[in-house]
Structure formats: structure tokens, C-alpha cells
Image (spheres, rainbow, N blue to C red):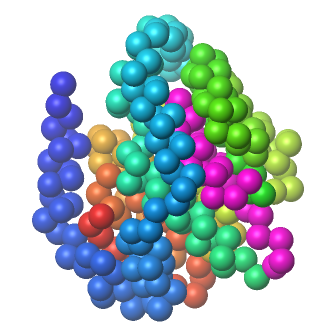
């Protein structure tokens, strides 16, 4: 079934995203990030292995059982159908990879390790991109489905990734619990929010994560035009005092924490 709200929202964005390539971004550092990082076409060798894993999942016709924590019911879906609909596209995942590389470059200390949080592991392909940039980084990923976590861990093992900690359970409770306990002294340099697509859940995730953001942190919200609720959440979060600039790519958006930037929302095409 076609999501007309999503489709129409993307068309409107495309027609109004006038500063393609970073034009009219006045901050030199933000212009460099957009032009030299996000629009970079260089390929990384690790991407080939991850995309082989994606291809394998797209051919997997086994069923998994998924729990909807909102209503307490279970459903069965084929792995390949989940892979088709819930995984970030290669282009989007590779932008996340480059963004993490950029954050590492900005760290002034010798130890350039950063903390990464992902909400919505799914089959673990996007998580692999988040972790593969440097296995010195620490990736904390949250997922509701035990069976999906099991599949994701198997893919990470085959890829030789060992810097991911996965948390299974209802993200509405596990996120705050883990950040207030195991990660209570940690900041979040990068976050990818792609879990429960409701206004209430998204705002709740944001309020938990934003307290851990620091200067030069970047948070990414996926599916910002998936529904009216998600679009409303995105627009509200963009107005937060801690967000100094936002980059709107239509299907997803980036929230930049940098006190030296002038408050603005830039519409871009990729």
C-alpha cells in the first residue's frame, strides 16, 4: 500500500530544496561537512561486505516472529520482506558512515573513539555501517524483537564486527534504563533514531538522548515525513534550544549541536 503522506511530502521537499550541494550555507564548517562529507562519492572497501550481507538477507525467506509492544501482539513476517522495507538504503547508510567519520575527525583528543546510539536495530545492516567506520567506537543499539537481534548478531559475526552492544526489549523503557545505569557517565556523539514512528515515542526518545548530546554531536532522525506525527515531531525538535542547525534531506534529517552555528534549517537533496 502506498503511503501517500510520505510520497507527497517527499515531492514537496524536492521542489523546495533549493540549496543542493551546500550552496547558501554560510558556516564554513557546515558547508565543508555537507559538500565534502555528505556529497563525497568515494567508496570504502568495508561497504562491499556489508552489502553482501544485505543481499543475503534479501534472499532469506524464513519467517520470524515480531512483537508489537504497543498492543502486546505478535506477527510473523519473512526476513526478506523486513529487509526490503526496514533497512536503510545503501546511500543513506553510507551517509551515516561518513558522518561518523567526520565526528571522529573533529575530536581534538588523541583518543578519537566516539559513542554511537541506534534506536531500531532491525536486521543489523545499518548498525554494521555505524560500527564499521572504526571498531574503536562503541555502538549501543536497541531493538524490540529477540529474533531480529539474533539475525543481526549473526551478520555482525560474519563481518567480524565486535564493537556493538545490543539491547533487546521495549525501547520505551530500555533506552532510559541503560543510559541512566550502564551509560550514566557517557555522552552520545551520534544517534540514529529509527524506532517507534509515533509522535509520543519519538519525543520521548529525543528527551532522553538530548541530555547526553555535547558540542559537535549529530543526531539523525529517519522517516521524518513518514506520517503527520513524525513530521510534527521533527519540526518540534528542530526548534529545540540545543539544536543549532538542522539538515533536512526529505526522508531523514540531521540535528547538529554546535554553539558557534547560527540557528537555521537547510533543505538539501541527495
Marks counted in the figure total 0
Task: Judge whether 249 appears above or below 259 on screen.
Answer: above
Q: Residue at x 15, y 48 (%)?
A: 8
Q: Is 212 positioned to the left or the right of 15 in the image?
A: right
Q: Position of residue 22 (x, y in %)?
A: 34, 81
Q: Residue at x 32, y 52 (%)?
A: 251
Task: Judge whether 105 appears above or below 210 on screen.
Answer: below
Q: Is 37 positioned to the left or the right of 85 in the image?
A: right
Q: Position of residue 146 (x, y in %)?
A: 64, 18
Q: Nearer the viewer, residue 210 or 161?
A: 161
Whether 46 is among the magenta residues is no
Q: Position of residue 137 (x, y in %)?
A: 74, 56
Q: Position of residue 128 (x, y in %)?
A: 59, 44
Q: Residue at x 18, y 25 (%)?
A: 1
Q: Quadrant of the C terminus?
A: bottom left
Whether 112 is among the magenta residues is yes
What residue range appears in magenta?
109-135
Q: Nearer the viewer, residue 247 or 159?
A: 159
Q: Is residue 75 visible?
A: no
Amino acid at each position: 500500500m502506498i503511503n501517500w503522506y510520505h510520497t507527497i511530502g517527499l515531492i514537496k521537499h524536492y521542489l523546495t530544496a533549493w540549496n543542493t550541494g551546500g550552496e547558501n550555507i554560510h558556516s564554513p564548517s557546515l558547508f565543508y561537512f555537507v559538500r565534502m562529507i555528505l556529497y563525497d562519492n568515494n567508496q570504502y572497501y568495508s561497504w562491499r561486505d556489508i552489502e553482501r550481507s544485505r543481499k543475503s538477507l534479501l534472499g532469506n525467506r524464513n519467517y520470524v516472529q515480531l512483537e508489537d509492544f504497543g498492543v502486546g501482539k505478535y506477527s510473523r513476517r519473512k526476513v526478506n520482506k523486513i529487509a526490503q522495507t526496514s533497512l536503510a538504503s545503501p546511500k543513506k547508510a553510507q551517509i551515516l558512515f561518513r558522518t561518523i567519520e567526520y565526528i571522529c575527525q573533529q575530536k581534538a583528543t588523541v583518543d578519537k573513539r566516539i559513542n554511537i546510539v541506534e534506536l531500531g536495530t532491525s536486521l543489523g545492516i545499518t548498525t554494521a555501517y555505524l560500527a564499521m567506520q572504526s571498531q574503536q567506537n562503541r555502538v549501543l543499539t536497541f531493538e524490540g524483537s529477540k529474533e531480529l537481534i539474533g539475525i543481526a548478531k549473526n551478520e555482525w559475526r560474519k563481518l567480524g564486527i565486535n564493537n556493538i552492544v545490543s539491547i533487546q526489549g521495549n525501547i520505551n523503557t530500555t533506552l532510559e534504563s541503560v543510559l541512566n545505569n550502564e551509560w550514566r557517565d557517557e555522552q552520545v556523539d551520534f544517534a540514529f533514531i529509527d524506532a517507534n514512528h509515533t509522535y509520543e515515542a519519538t519525543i520521548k526518545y529525543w528527551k532522553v538522548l538530548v541530555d547526553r548530546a555535547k558540542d559537535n554531536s549529530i543526531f539523525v532522525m529517519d522517516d521524518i515525513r513518514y506520517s503527520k506525527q513524525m513530521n510534527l515531531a521533527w519540526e518540534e525538535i528542530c526548534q529545540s534550544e540545543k539544536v543549532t542547525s538542522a539538515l533536512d534531506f526529505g526522508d531523514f534529517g540531521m540535528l547538529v549541536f554546535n554553539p558557534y552555528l547560527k540557528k537555521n534549517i537547510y533543505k538539501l537533496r541527495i
